[in-house]
Amino acid sequence: MLTLAIATATEQVGVAIGRAGGPVSSLHLQQGRRHGEVLAPAIQSLMRLSHTTLREVELIAVDTGPGLFTGLRVGVATAKALASALGVPVAACSSLELLAAPHAAAGLAVVSVVDARRGEVFWQSFHPEPVGDAQVTPPEVLVAALEDAGGPVIVAGDGARRYAPLLEQVEGVAIAGPEHDHPSAAVLVELAATRPGLSPEKITPEYMRGADVRIGWEQRDA
């Protein structure tokens, strides 16, 4: 099944195309918060590089978050629109699962951490399956959880990179390399084969909190 994967939960825009065995081609671009400008041209470039057309795509896979509000909105809306136009299903995967997946073979606990801005992080533990629910907390709460759990543990994601000086104070914590700072569309191609294909209207972003703009107004009114 030819899969087109879209990952836009962080500042990186990722697209990939491939089958269950892995991606054929992938593009990962960091252009700040310009997801709406970058995503469509990235998909077009990907089709040219892989010598495929959208008509050949049988499944759309999308990272549903948590992550940046605008990035998720653009990625999920694009995935749903393409799936509806092509008449194909959509497979959903969380950004935290995508960050953890490359480290599953290490046999260690993994904590995925996405920078939620405003002094908070989205995070979830895996070993290799999810351990507990995803949370949004200040990084100090994550540090306390890591201290309670004990190491060794791999911590991955742009949130881990941002708060590395704080997290590295915990014994047994190893910060994954910068190549693991963002959810990978190439990894999403592989995980999509293990997920059910759903109708587009059933796919929703996992924001876990309101948009930054609305939060700002609520704080101003408080």
Image: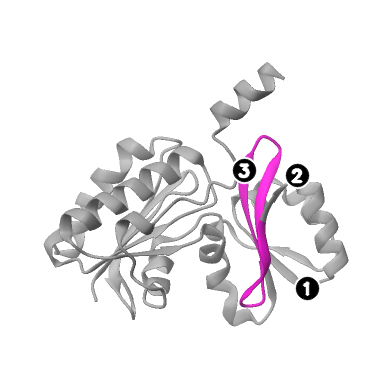
Q: Amino acid at mark 1?
A: Pro
Instruction: Say how the picture is coloured.
Output: one colour
Left or right, 35 with respect to 178, comes to left
On-image quarter of the C terminus: top right
- Label 2 crowd bin: few (<14), some (14–19), many (20+), radius 10 Å: some
Residue located 19% across and 66% down the image: 57
Q: Position of residue 159 (x, y in %)?
A: 64, 49
Q: Position of residue 174 (x, y in %)?
A: 73, 65
Residue located 41% across and 63% down the image: 92
Q: Of the residues tagged 1 and 2, which is closer to the observer? A: 2
On-image quarter of the N terminus: bottom left
Residue 138 image label: 2
Q: Amino acid at mark 3?
A: Ala
Q: Amino acid at mark 2?
A: Pro
Q: Are marks 1 and 2 in contact (CB under 8 Å)?
A: no
Q: Calculate the distance from the C-alpha at mark 1 to the C-alpha at mark 3.
A: 25 Å
Question: Does the magenta portion include 115?
Answer: yes
Left or right, 45 with respect to 141, comes to left
* Residue pointed to by mark 3: 116
Q: Which residues are magenta?
A: 111-134
